[in-house]
Image (cartoon, coloured by chain):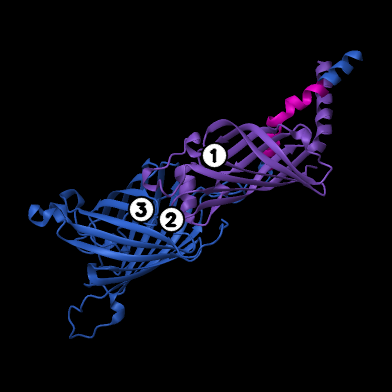
Amino acid sequence: MKKLFFGVLLAGLATGAAAQNIQMTKSGKVSFYSRAKSPEKVEADNNEVSSVLNTQTGDLVFAILLKSFHFERALMEEHFNENYVESNKYPKSTFKGKIVNISSVNFSKDGAYPVTVEGELNLHGVSRQVSYTGSVIIKSGKVNATSRFSIKLKDYNVSIPSLVADKISEDIDVTVDCKYEPKS
Amino acid sequence: MKKYLVLFLLLNLLSPLLRAQDDLMKMLENESKKERKKDYATATFKTTRLINGQSIENVAAGVMDVKISHRFGMVNRGSYESFGLDQATMRMGLDYGISNRLMVGIGRSTYQKQYDAYYKFKILRQSKGGRGSSPISISATSSVMLNTLKWEDPKRQNYYTSRITYAHQLIIARKFSEGLSLQLMPSYVHYNLAQAATDPNDIFALGAGGRIKLSKRLSFNVEYYHVLPISLVEGQDYRLPGTKNSLAVGFDIETGGHVFQLHFTNSTGMTEKTFITETTGDFFKGDIHFGFNLSRVFTIKNKKFRKK
């Protein structure tokens, strides 16, 4: 019992030490855009994305509140939440993964480092293993991570009624831009 | 001591693996719990009308909603009248969202050649999380209706103001789940001029209604107004002679920017005074109008990435 107590204590110390490598943001930006034939633009911005990056291990997580995506048109926003991503049932989209080549990023030297991220993307109740490329940009000690990729709606069981098929594309372009701060 | 050292080293080696992504996720969750944002109930109903009357919904700021509403004749008039399809009364309306809480609208009805204007204001919005969350939404709406039929007796002294009727309503609504929304509508209608000495100038009613969603884009709606036996003046009736309570059942069908509402109702008019206080049809004897409301929204003012 005593051993266990010490063990827990030490584990606690160990995590405390690791915290220095934690970079965090609560105001990351994720946007998406539907490349459809129709001139009506379907695009939205979310400026309240939270994410944590462990600069030592490369572990990376995102939590995205779907209701925080804002559209130009109120009705699009309502339909996005009600009919497509069903944000009452699935309020969050999450990503849990890793920057696999984290060792190639020199956090103490300015520059843009190409990275590959692998992990599990959860959206609309569906989890999928994904791998995307992006870059980690270091500028005077600040960490900025960006990525641009495309997802298929049917991979996440988001169906588009035939009536609006020409307005919403099956492929959605996603851009991610997060400026991290060291977690105190 | 050696044992502890081994344990310490082991834990140090293991800890990054143990922590990994789930711990980071937990860290995010804890952070977001600290500043839980208020989550407002949205889309309690598909459009600003339940069937005949107002729903708790407003059009968003800068959005214009063109509404065209039809009520055909009564279905029990037989094949000679093509079961009511030979007649129609209609209302053309234009609604506009001034802010996300306040909307205004105007309309013209063929029935009684009415003009009407109204506002609807969101007093309280159903929300959860954060401080001051509310289990219900409350809105206030008032409308003014002007009947422009020719004077019944042009020879006598007629006043313009005697054509005017006002209606005031509170709308109390709750979205119980994705599938079920209900609302109550305490209502008050004031006639500047009553037809007969025994007719009331002030009529009180309680409305109730709701929807059940049958699919993402289809819902079943019910709306009922019960005129209350409250009379402000002795010797006056509490309701207009020969009138019935208004009942309507129907469906909302949503297709992108349009909402179609198809329904059956015993009311002919589409303004508050006409359906709450002047409904003469008996629903259960087949005095039922088939009708529809068509709504098409246009975004007039594009606010780039509007903030809620």
Taking the image as shown, residue A140 lies to the left or right of residue A37, namely right
Does the CB distance between marks 1 and 2 fall below 8 Å? no
Q: Is the magenta stretch mostly helix, strand or loop?
A: helix
Colour of chain B, in one word, is blue
Q: Is residue B16 magenta?
A: yes
Q: Which amino acid does label 2 sit on?
A: Glu
| Eye-nearest disc, 3 or 2 | 3
Residue located 40% across and 48% down the image: A164
Choose top left, top right, bottom left or bottom right for residue B171.
Answer: bottom left
Rendered position, A162 above or below B7? below
Q: Which amino acid does label 1 sit on?
A: Ile
- Residue linked to disc 3: B259
Q: The purple chain is which one?
A: A
Q: Position of residue B196 (x, y in %)?
A: 21, 72
- Residue linked to disc 1: A151
Look at the image and give the residue range highlighted in magenta.
B11-31
- Say whether disc 3 or disc 2 marks the residue closer to the N-terminus: 2
Taking the image as shown, residue B103 lies to the left or right of residue B239, namely right
Both labels 1 and 2 in a single chain: no
Residue located 46% across and 55% down the image: A40
Rendered position, B57 above or below B10? below
Q: Nearer the viewer, residue A76 or B107?
A: A76
Residue B183 in view (yes/no): yes
| Eye-nearest disc, 1 or 2 | 1
Taking the image as shown, residue A106 lies to the left or right of residue A174, namely right
